[in-house]
């Protein structure tokens, strides 16, 4: 087995683990928010969400983009200058700790002013409490990014995806059962983040992943900040893109439109789950290959990984795209059915983002962080301009079209510069065949306008679609040898014998 296959199998294993952790986190986060929303008033739940929004903005600024740059930098230093890895880790941790403390103080002192902006004075007291979670959040993010640079997913899944949401849910349940006042929610949020950080640090020390020492290397620090600043602005731009639709719908339309759109948007964003999960382990592995100057291997890993992400995402996308009304009704109820068209448009936008592969992370790996920032700047401007034009005409569908087009713009820009710098692109011949087969089949189903209202008929249609897709994929010989090697590795790991499938694959590879 060559090193490309080994790298792909490591990424596949990490993707599965991170995907599980992400689903666990989403489910427990949903439960916590549901309990808070049901137990407290609508306005109090609004204050909770506003405080988290403000805290999220502060977190982006406090971490200085290190959460995106450290995985690449740690992996790069481990390959090129292993003796300086400890200095890099210590310097990054000190910078983030100090910056997060500064922004905690700013949040506390400016709480009243922020509350006046939102015309919600209860927000001031909430911010003065929840601001204390900022240093814990920042250091959790940095520590997990460092562990990511070592090619590990354990710390993210155990602590960020399992321990924190579980602890927060339990504390919220206790508070609501004992009928504690609303401010209790903010206190337990801080406690949950503090406990998660302490548990994470103890575990890192226990497994001796890296040492803790006070060492501030100004040369390493300044280089890291310069490299990370475009990623900081990129984080801010992404935040702007995520909230522009909601804010402009509220301005041009109504709160009802905002509610409908925010039923469709989170469902469409789930389409990215495998891309995001794969990127977590792709960055350190590809960074080490880049440090060794092995661009061709990165290109091969990129193409096969993009194909795998697409194959995993296709069933989820098919459900959302073919049956948006049923999907909306299942999660939010029939009163949100009007958002079905917006959900379908958003699904196309996020699927476009997915099928182009990890282009943004690849630009970070090769050190071209500015192109990520510029791409997101174009996308944010496109989103704002299109929202101004389309929301007054088409409402939530206009907002969805704006987001879909802006994601397309960002991905075309990133992919263009990635190809220009490295000749890396996602479109292998086998991947192109899979894309044609899948979208032709989806187009046929959509064209014949299947009007079914029974969920079992929809499941049957989906199963038939996937079976035909699988058959045509094999018939077109879209299977690579690395696909077979991954299948054999999974078979060995599960200790099962799948002779029929292996005989079938041998005929079509």
Image (cartoon, rainbow, N blue to C red):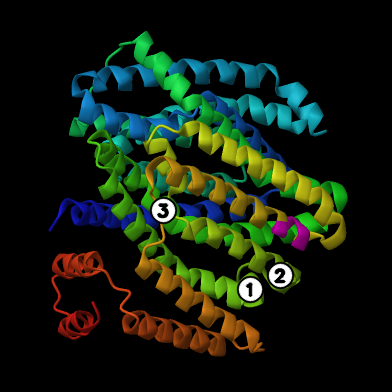
Q: Nearest to the eye among marks 3 and 2: give it.
A: 3
Give SS at disc 1: helix
Q: Residue at x 45, y 33 (%)?
A: 368
Q: Residue 437, percent across and down?
A: 46, 78
Q: Is residue 304 left or right of residue 22?
A: left
Magenta stretch: dominant SS? helix
Q: Would you name the residue on which mark 2 appears?
A: 341
Residue bounds of the magenta highlight: 397-401
Check disc 3: other Cα within 10 Å, few if <14, some if 14-19, many if 20+.
Answer: some
Q: CA distance from mark 1 to mark 2?
A: 7 Å
Say above or below: 223 vs 317.
Answer: above
Q: CA distance from mark 3 to mark 2?
A: 31 Å
Q: Quadrant of the C terminus?
A: bottom left
- Dots 3, 2 in contact, CB < 8 A: no
Q: Residue at x 37, y 46 (%)?
A: 280
Give SS at disc 2: helix
Give SS at disc 3: loop
Say above or below: 505 vs 157.
Answer: below
Q: Residue at x 40, y 30 (%)?
A: 142
Q: Is residue 147 left or right of residue 446?
A: left
* Whether residue 52 can be seen here: no
Q: Would you name the residue on which mark 1 appears?
A: 324
Q: Nearest to the eye among marks 3 and 1: give it.
A: 3
Q: Earlier in the sequence, mark 3 or mark 1?
A: 1
């Amino acid at each position: 087995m060559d090193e490309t296959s080994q790298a792909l199998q490591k990424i596949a294993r990490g993707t599965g683990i991170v995907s599980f952790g992400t689903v666990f986190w989403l489910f427990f986060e949903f439960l916590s928010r549901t309990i808070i929303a049901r137990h407290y008033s609508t306005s109090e739940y609004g204050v909770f969400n506003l405080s988290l929004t403000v805290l999220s903005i502060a977190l982006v600024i406090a971490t200085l983009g290190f959460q995106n740059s450290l995985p690449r930098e740690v992996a790069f230093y481990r390959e090129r200058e292993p003796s300086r890895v400890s200095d890099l880790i210590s310097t990054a941790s000190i910078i983030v700790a100090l910056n997060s403390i500064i922004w905690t103080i700013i949040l506390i002192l400016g709480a009243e002013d922020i509350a006046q902006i939102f015309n919600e004075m209860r927000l001031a007291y909430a911010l003065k409490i929840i601001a204390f979670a900022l240093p814990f959040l920042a250091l959790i993010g940095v520590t997990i990014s460092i562990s990511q640079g070592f090619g590990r997913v354990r710390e993210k899944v155990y602590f960020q995806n399992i321990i924190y949401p579980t602890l927060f849910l339990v504390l919220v349940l206790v508070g609501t059962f004992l009928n504690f006042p609303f401010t209790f929610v903010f206190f337990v949020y801080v406690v949950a983040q503090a406990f998660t950080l302490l548990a994470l640090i103890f575990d890192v020390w226990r497994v001796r992943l890296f040492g803790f020492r006070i060492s501030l290397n100004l040369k390493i620090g300044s280089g890291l900040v310069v490299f990370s600043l475009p990623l900081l602005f990129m984080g801010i731009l992404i935040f702007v893109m995520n909230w522009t639709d909601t804010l402009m719908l509220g301005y041009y339309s109504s709160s009802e439109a905002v509610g409908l759109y925010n039923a469709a948007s989170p469902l469409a964003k789930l389409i990215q789950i495998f891309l995001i999960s794969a990127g977590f382990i792709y960055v350190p592995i590809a960074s080490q290959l880049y440090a060794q100057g092995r661009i061709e291997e990165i290109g091969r890993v990129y193409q096969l990984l993009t194909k795998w992400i697409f194959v995993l995402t296709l069933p989820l996308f098919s459900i959302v795209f073919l049956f948006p009304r049923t999907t909306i009704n299942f999660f939010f109820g029939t009163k949100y059915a009007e958002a079905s068209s917006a959900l379908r448009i958003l699904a196309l936008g996020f699927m476009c983002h997915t099928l182009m592969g990890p282009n943004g992370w690849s630009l970070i790996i090769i050190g071209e962080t500015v192109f990520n920032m510029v791409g997101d700047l174009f996308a944010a401007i496109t989103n704002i301009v299109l929202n101004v034009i389309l929301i007054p005409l088409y409402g939530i569908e206009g907002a969805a079209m704006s987001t879909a087009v802006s994601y397309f713009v960002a991905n075309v820009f990133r992919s263009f510069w990635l190809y220009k710098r490295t000749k890396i692109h996602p479109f292998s011949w086998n991947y192109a065949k899979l894309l044609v087969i899948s979208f032709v089949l989806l187009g046929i189903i959509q064209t014949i306008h299947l009007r079914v209202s029974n969920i079992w008929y929809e499941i049957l249609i989906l199963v038939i679609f996937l079976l035909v897709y699988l058959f045509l994929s094999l018939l077109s010989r879209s299977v690579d040898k690395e696909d077979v090697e991954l299948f054999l590795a999974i078979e060995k790991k599960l200790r099962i014998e799948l002779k029929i499938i292996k005989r079938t694959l041998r005929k079509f590879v």
